[in-house]
Image (cartoon, grey):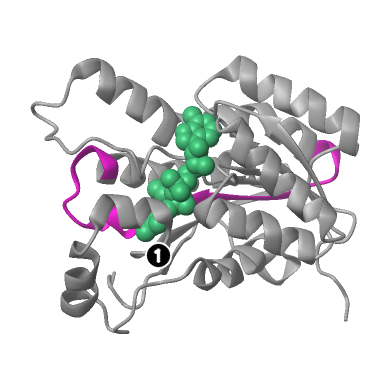
Amino acid sequence: MNKRFEDKVVVVTGAAQGIGEAYARALAEEGAAVVVADLNEEAGAKVAASINEGGGRAIFVPCDVSSAASAEALVSRTVEELGGIDHLVNNAAIYGSMEFNLLISVDWDYYKRFMAVNLDGALVMTRAVHPEIARRGGGAIVNQSSTAAYLYSGFYGLAKAGINSLTQQLAHELGGQRIRVNAIAPGPTDTEATRTQAGDAAKDIVRNSLAIKRIGSVDDMVGALLFLLSDDASWVTGQVLAVDGGQTFRL
Ligand SMILES: NC(=O)c1ccc[n+]([C@@H]2O[C@H](COP(=O)([O-])OP(=O)(O)OC[C@H]3O[C@@H](n4cnc5c(N)ncnc54)[C@H](O)[C@@H]3O)[C@@H](O)[C@H]2O)c1
């Protein structure tokens, strides 16, 4: 069977664990050379090594998505080692370890750091990476949103609502360079971060708010990502695709 991403280079941020790791592994299985980009050097390096051991191609590049210098360094290293960039997946976020607090009382420095990673990080990475995608004749960017954008969830939801708007704005700014920009909005998905964050409350969310009565798996997200990055989605841009077991409806 044809591998859909043969000869493509894909940068996946936050790929050291959870959904990002599943994205990186699936892309490598489809033939892509994958850049595992993450703050967590130990876990990220392990993911890249395990992809290589399994016959795929991956490099780990340490990266803080909130830093333009870090994003530029990632681009230089990727181009040097893999020859260019075709697609970008902006998945990194502060999530599993995030503080529970209100918008009106959260520590201001914490809030600024949170937004710098969870909202601005996708823009920082896009600004650094898009010239390389354009140089290869175009490609795609997928941002990781959340159904939290549509539900009360404080600064986490605010950042994800921003990601949705960023997706629409960037789709217009980059469409002329043949770069499509879409987002995936996962519902509650079984990762270590969710287990830490939601604990048993996840069961109530599934019971009370999902049409399909089970928590999502990282594999549930993979199909949407591969579709949005592939040529099957060549006229799809500026969209936010909910992969959420029917948790949210938008008319
Ligand atoms: N798991 C869910 O239920 C769920 C639901 C909706 C949306 N999401 C979103 O999906 C994405 C992944 O979720 P997950 O459950 O796999 O989370 P996770 O916490 O397991 O993974 C996030 C990764 O991002 C990395 N990261 C954090 N800050 C970074 C930075 N500044 N620079 C680079 N890397 C950084 C972390 O080291 C980690 O590897 C996040 O954007 C999250 O908001 C998750």
- x, y percentage for residue 54? 82, 61
- x, y percentage for residue 60? 73, 37
Residue 209 location, quadrant: bottom left
Per the image, label 1 sits on a secondary structure element best described as loop
- x, y percentage for residue 205? 20, 69
Q: Left or right: where does residue 201 sit relative to residue 91?
A: left
User: Residue at (39%, 44%) from the top-left corner?
Assistant: 165
Among all residues in the image, which is located at the extreme left?
104
The question of residue 88 being in magenta is answered with: no
User: Residue at (60%, 60%) from the top-left corner?
Assistant: 22
Q: Can the viewer see residue 251 in this picture?
A: no
Within 10 Å of the Cα at label 1, are there few (<14), some (14-19), or many (20+) other Cα atoms? some
Q: Left or right: where does residue 3 sit relative to residue 248?
A: right
Ligand 1 quadrant assignment: top left
- State the extent of the magenta-drawn residues as a range: 134-156
Residue holding disc 1: 190
- x, y percentage for residue 161? 32, 46
Specify the quadrant that holds the C terminus: bottom left
58 or 150, nearer to the observer:
58
The question of residue 143 being in magenta is answered with: yes
Using the image, determine if residue 45 lies above or below residue 188.
above
Q: Can the viewer see residue 132 in this picture?
A: yes
Cβ(mark 1) to ligand 1 < 8 Å? Answer: yes
Mark 1: amino acid: Asp
43 or 181, nearer to the observer:
43
Using the image, determine if residue 248 lies above or below residue 185.
below
User: Residue at (54%, 49%) from the top-left corner?
Assistant: 17
Among all residues in the image, which is located at the extreme bottom?
212
Using the image, determine if residue 169 lies above or below residue 193.
above
49 or 111, nearer to the observer:
49
Residue 98 location, quadrant: top left
